[in-house]
Image (tube, grey):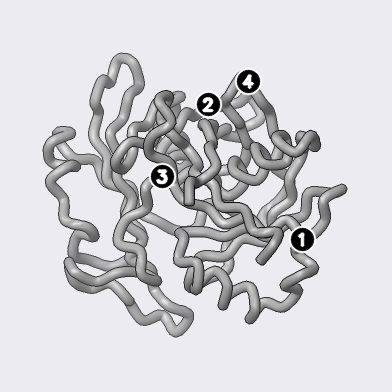
Amino acid sequence: MNDLDVLRVFCGPDGGGGNALGVVRDGAALPGADARAALAAELGFSETIFLDDAVRGTVDIHTPGVRLPFAGHPLVGLAWLLRSLGRPPRTLRPPAGEVAVDFEGDVTWVRGRAEWVPARTTRRYASVAEVDALPAPPPGEGWLYAWAWQDEAAGVVRARGFPRRIDERGVSRSSGAGARAGGIAEDEATGAAAMLLTHELGRPLDIRQGAGSRILTRIHSDGTIAVGGRVRRATP
């Protein structure tokens, strides 16, 4: 597609890491749910986002297998892209609700609510080494966010995200250690899971996820949680 942009979202300060994202800036080019699901599956990224109304900021988010009401890394990526095109948004509107957008230097922030995050389990491990030693994905069913304190006093977390998704019939697609959800064994960086963990711990976090990604979080007085990070265009 001519209007498809591929980004890396939640990059580290050195530009490394980041979770791949497909952005379709002209959602009208693919108006049907089936066509969007097919493109998301073909691209194989953890999420692909479609911009349906550039003025209102209305968006539609798909994984290779399901449609999501909210997800952090697609919204951060799209907000960054629109800013790079000279159209920085103040608000984006996924199905879950209105998402405020902010920019601070090279960090893009979006704000949502923990109750918007699709069901997933956060599991604390005793050490960073234990998190790093997990297979991708670990045995079991359902979305798992594995984490450990890297520096608790400073709020620095080491995390890894494993989709282990269940399909539309309720059947697990990842009951064994070698199974993958929609072809994705591990998410490099996951904004919604970072938001959920921030809500559970009740404090801002600096999350080091995957092979080199970094996610920043904040808690606001209105109960929303912001997730922020750096974005880069993916190299061919």
User: Outermost residue, right direction?
Assistant: 55
Q: Quadrant of the N terminus?
A: bottom right
Say which amino acid is labelled 1.
Answer: Asp
In the rendered view, tell whether residue 109 sits above or below residue 76: above
Looking at this rendering, what residue extends furthest in the top direction? 153
Residue 165 at what x, y percent from top left? 38, 68
Give the secondary structure at mark 1.
loop
Foreground: disc 1 or disc 4: 1
> Of the residues under marks 1 and 2, which one precedes in the sequence?
1
Choose the circle earlier in sequence order: 4 or 3. 4
Can you say whether 31 is above or below 117 in the image?
below
Disc 4 or disc 2, which is closer to the eye? 4
What residue sits right under mark 2 in the picture? 218
Mark seen at residue 26: 1
Q: Is residue 172 left or right of residue 103?
A: left
**Alpha carbons under labels 4 and 3: distance apart:** 20 Å
Neighbor class of circle 1 (other Cα within 10 Å; few <14, some 14-19, many 20+) is some
- Residue at (57, 57) in percent of width and height: 22
Instruction: Say if residue 69 shows up in the picture.
Output: no
Type of the residue with mark 3: Ala
> Who comes first in sequence, dot 3 or dot 1?
1
Q: Residues within 10 Å of mark 4 (few under 14, many from 20)?
A: few
Residue at position x 41%, y 44% in the image: 189
Label 4 belongs to which residue?
Answer: 104
- For the residues labelled 3 and 1, the Cα–Cα distance comes to 25 Å
Mark 3, residue position: 189
- Looking at the image, is mark 1 or mark 4 earlier in the sequence? 1
Q: Amino acid at mark 4?
A: Glu
1 and 4 marks in contact (CB < 8 Å): no
Q: Secondary structure at mark 2?
A: strand
Q: Residue at x 82, y 56 (%)?
A: 53
What amino acid is found at the position of numbered circle 2 in the picture?
Arg
